[in-house]
Image (cartoon, rainbow, N blue to C red):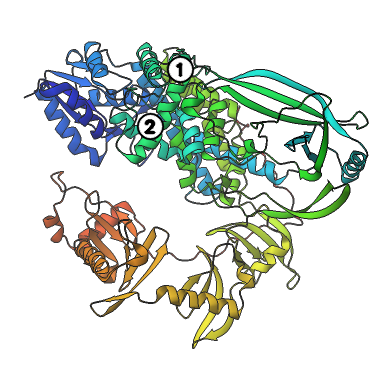
């Protein structure tokens, strides 16, 4: 039996460390936190801010196993990650396992390599209570904000919503950027570009130094250009350098992985976690750009070997951020001799980290910039051609240059032909093109992380969860924005003739960028009006600094919580009592047919428009907005059009045809079958002919491609990729199959495997009640309709076995469901619409005066 027990937080990490420590050590995983605040209820004493931690049901078995192992061990080594979260995991383990201080060692390491692990074993320390308290402060403060602000949203906006300290600020950034874009007034100018040729007939592309405010001035310049000879007025050459970027921090890795690899923030962190746990890179949650001397030496050896002495420039970088946290080193490879890792997905990110770190230790690139001025003394403005040549590639040899679309517009990296001052040039073509100014770009995932970091909001461990949360809550999404069109004027001088033409300019289109949803805007506006301080960027950054001060031992964590709550809670009570309800309501006008008010607002099922009000004698008419529409921008005319849906068309093959708009977008309903209208197509433009085309396309797609045991098999491509369909069962087709050329054997194999899986899916099933006990990936569960419920433990605290579950009665299962959802079997009665107070005219919502209570301090 091993005398040493090492506890880490992940099985992959445990497996790697076990290889290095050998049989004298037993390495076990806690699978993350073993205890936390309870899932139900606040779980915090708000007088003393003492948390009521509990071991979750799914961790009780793990805790039991760890307790047994700890009793048998002479020394317990707590080896969770080195940041605040990792320190808290070690503290919770020590508390829950009741470890004695004299038999407990805390060890940390930046990388999972043999040397690092053995060095950590030689240099243990005690649990750093300051780091633990900083984590507790964050966890408790965020729980308070979420648990107290969310019910306010349920009451004042819509049930089921949530608020959070950092997530709400992230949503605010997205909403404010969208409003900025929405209210942006583009200004047009005319940019003039020319192509000139020298006596060797080599082209030189150049731009005029100044733009013209209108087409008349631009055309006048082109007329002047007809009358003059162009020549080289000046040639300037100057040396320049490009400097390598520092090694990666968490946020710069997320940004670069997005730019170069197209990875999302969460995806980047998942891959980086695996690289770390498998020993390929150092710890991936860090603010630091520092490299250890060993790393600098390792990089130098590799650079000398691969590129030569002239490319090597060992250096260290200093972290500019004052909030840089505990992790003391940048993200880097643990061994520069390892150029590739076996897994293809891991290797893409590893290559990025490897090359960036290597480049940071290489010489600057040397460039020569050339600027040629072209014009004539008679012209008011002159042209300028810019180019540059890389004289010595330096770090670019390893890392290269990445350009996004915006950079391409200002591309100066071109070779220019050799010319001399005074040399006569002839113009090939000079164009003046109308260009419009652009608003700030919408945020990408990486761009939002960068902005949060600039504002001092969040820390390396919080960026990815924050980005994921605001999407999961459906406050923002990354839907595609269709471009708009406008006319632009282009004036061209060629062959001594001036021509004008009107072109179509597409603008405003976007994809894979954050756009606020309607509910996201309504929630943000409500919180900004009523909880301005909580959403203030400076305040949120100050809270992060408080956590840093706690971690450094400069501030007491409960004092921080008291100071926050003493101002925050009275504000909650004030808003609960006095704030107006918010639904984003916009009055668009009067319906021309009925004379009733046409309103856009958030409804029970999302953004909608309605004709009439709740207290009218007749029930109001409702229509859902389409996916590309939103409450803030929908026009009166667009809103009226929505009431034309659904509409009937001529029957086809004896079945009624209808065009409608549902939860998943516009559709054609043919008989009882719903067929989606292709993305981007206007449902109001669907006539008999187009509807029949859509139906026929569906019929062709659904036509059997084969038969299996006398039943037809169809195929298609859905939300989760290619599939075949047999007797109403959808069967995913893995990539190893040739989907376009499935053989009969392939089809039989896929169906047999699915049927076998389905046969093993149900432990018990009550079809009439729509209740089942099913096998799932992480163990058995209960389903009612599509809702999932946990299976409780037995009276003895053990898990039910599949054999036990075969004997469970329907009444017992219903009791389990009711314990988790008291309303699961209740029939919901529709409430009568609430009477609205009569209003003479709609005015901007004014805040009610607080009743009896003074306004909360900010």
Vertical placement of residue 438 versus 238, above or below:
below
> Residue at image x 57%, y 58%?
627
x and y, in percent, of residue 211 in the image: 82, 36
Percent x, y for residue 303?
41, 19
What residue is shown with label 2? Answer: 350
Dot placed on the residue nearer the N-terminal end, 2 or 1: 2
Q: Is residue 422 left or right of residue 134?
A: right
Near-viewer residue (749 or 327): 749
Category of crowding for the residue at label 1, using alpha-carbon neighbours closer than 10 angstroms: few (below 14), some (14–19), many (at least 20): many
In this rendered view, identify the residue nearer to me: 102 or 256. 256
- Mark 2, mark 1: which one is toward the viewer? 1
Left/right placement of residue 304 relative to residue 831 reads left
Q: Secondary structure at mark 1?
A: loop
Q: Is residue 482 shown left or right of residue 199?
A: left
Q: Residues within 10 Å of mark 2 (few under 14, many from 20)?
A: many
Query: Could you say which quadrant of the image residue 502 lies in?
Result: bottom right
Q: Is residue 51 left or right of residue 801?
A: right
Q: From the image, which quarter does the N terminus lie in?
A: top left
Say which residue label 1 marks: 361
Q: Considering only vertical position in the picture, is 69 above or below 819?
A: above
- Image quadrant holding the C terminus, namely top right
Q: Can you see residue 310?
A: yes
- What residue sits 59% from the left and 29% below the top? 537
Residue 487 is marked as none
Q: CA–CA distance between discs 2 and 1?
A: 17 Å
Instruction: Find residue 657 and report its horizontal and vertical position in percent.
Output: 53, 80
């Amino acid at each position: 039996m091993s005398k040493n027990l090492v506890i880490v937080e992940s099985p992959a990490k445990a497996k790697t460390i076990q290889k290095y420590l050998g049989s004298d050590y037993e390495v076990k995983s806690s699978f993350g936190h073993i205890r936390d605040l309870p899932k139900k209820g606040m779980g915090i004493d708000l007088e003393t801010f003492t948390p009521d931690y509990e071991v979750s049901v799914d961790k009780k078995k793990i805790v039991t196993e760890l307790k047994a192992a700890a009793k048998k061990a002479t020394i317990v080594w707590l080896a969770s990650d080195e940041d605040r979260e990792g320190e808290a995991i070690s503290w919770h383990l020590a508390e829950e396992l009741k470890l004695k201080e004299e038999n407990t060692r805390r060890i940390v390491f930046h990388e999972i390599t043999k040397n690092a692990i053995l060095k950590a074993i030689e240099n243990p320390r005690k649990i750093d209570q300051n780091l633990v308290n900083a984590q507790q402060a964050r966890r408790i403060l965020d729980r308070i904000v979420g648990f107290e602000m969310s019910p306010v949203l349920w009451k004042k906006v819509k049930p089921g919503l949530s608020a959070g300290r950092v997530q709400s600020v992230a949503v605010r950034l997205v909403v404010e950027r969208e409003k900025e874009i929405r209210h942006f007034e583009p200004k047009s100018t005319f940019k003039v570009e020319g192509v000139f040729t020298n006596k060797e007939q080599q082209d030189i592309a150049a731009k005029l130094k100044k733009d013209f405010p209108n087409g008349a001035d631009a055309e006048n310049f082109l007329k002047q250009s007809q009358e003059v000879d162009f020549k080289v007025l000046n040639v300037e050459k100057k040396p320049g350098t490009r400097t390598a970027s520092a090694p990666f921090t968490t946020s710069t890795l997320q940004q670069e992985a997005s730019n170069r690899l197209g990875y999302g923030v969460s995806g980047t962190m998942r891959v980086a976690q695996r690289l770390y746990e498998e020993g390929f890179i150092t710890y991936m949650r860090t603010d630091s750009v520092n490299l250890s001397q060993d790393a600098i030496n390792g990089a130098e050896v590799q650079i000398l070997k691969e590129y030569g002495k002239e490319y090597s420039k060992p250096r260290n970088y200093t972290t500019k951020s004052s909030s840089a946290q505990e992790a003391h080193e940048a993200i880097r490879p643990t061994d520069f001799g390892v150029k590739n890792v076996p897994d293809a997905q891991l290797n893409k990110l590893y290559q990025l980290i490897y090359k960036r770190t290597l480049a940071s230790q290489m010489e600057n690139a040397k460039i020569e910039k050339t600027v040629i001025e072209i014009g004539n003394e008679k012209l008011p403005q002159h042209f300028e051609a810019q180019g540059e040549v890389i004289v010595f590639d330096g770090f670019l040899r390893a890392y290269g240059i990445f350009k996004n679309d915006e950079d391409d517009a200002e591309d100066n990296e071109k070779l220019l032909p050799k010319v001399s001052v005074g040399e006569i040039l002839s113009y090939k073509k000079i164009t003046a093109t109308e260009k419009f100014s652009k608003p700030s770009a919408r945020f990408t995932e990486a761009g939002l992380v960068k902005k949060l970091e600039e504002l001092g909001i969040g820390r390396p461990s919080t960026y990815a969860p924050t980005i994921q949360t605001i999407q999961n809550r459906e406050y923002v999404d990354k839907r595609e924005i269709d471009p708009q069109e406008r006319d632009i004027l282009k004036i061209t001088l060629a062959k001594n003739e001036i021509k004008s033409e009107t072109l179509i300019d597409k603008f405003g289109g976007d994809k894979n960028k954050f756009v606020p949803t309607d509910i996201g805007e309504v929630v943000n506006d409500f919180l900004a009006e009523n909880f301005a301080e909580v959403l203030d960027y400076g305040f949120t950054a100050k809270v992060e600094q408080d956590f840093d001060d706690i971690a450094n031992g400069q501030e007491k964590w409960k004092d921080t919580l008291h100071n926050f709550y003493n101002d925050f809670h009275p504000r909650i009570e004030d808003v609960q009592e006095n704030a107006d309800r918010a639904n984003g309501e916009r009055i668009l006008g009067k319906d021309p047919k009925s004379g009733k008010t046409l309103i856009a607002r958030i409804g029970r099922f999302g953004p909608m428009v309605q004709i009439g009000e709740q207290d009218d004698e007749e029930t109001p008419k409702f229509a859902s907005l389409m996916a590309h529409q939103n409450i803030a921008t929908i026009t009166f005319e667009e809103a009226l059009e929505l009431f034309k849906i659904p509409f009937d068309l001529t029957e086809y093959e004896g079945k009624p045809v209808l065009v409608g708009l549902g939860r998943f977008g516009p559709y054609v309903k043919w008989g009882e079958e719903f067929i989606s209208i292709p993305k981007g197509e206007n449902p109001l433009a669907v006539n008999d002919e187009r509807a029949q085309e859509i139906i026929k396309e569906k019929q062709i797609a659904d036509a059997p491609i084969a038969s299996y045991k006398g039943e037809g098999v169809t195929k298609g491509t859905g939300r989760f990729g290619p599939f075949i369909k047999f007797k109403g069962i959808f069967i995913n087709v893995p990539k190893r199959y040739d989907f376009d050329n499935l053989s009969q054997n392939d089809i039989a194999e896929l169906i047999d495997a699915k049927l076998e899986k389905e046969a093993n899916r149900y432990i018990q099933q009550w079809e009439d009640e729509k209740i089942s006990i099913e096998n799932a990936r992480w163990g058995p569960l209960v389903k009612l309709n599509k809702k999932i419920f946990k299976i409780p433990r037995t009276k003895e605290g053990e898990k039910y076995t599949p054999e036990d579950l075969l004997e469970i009665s329907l009444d017992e299962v219903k009791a389990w469901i009711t314990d988790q959802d008291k309303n699961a079997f209740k029939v919901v009665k529709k409430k009568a619409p609430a009477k609205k107070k009569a209003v003479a005219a709609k005015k901007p919502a004014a805040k009610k005066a607080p009743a009896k209570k003074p306004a909360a301090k900010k």
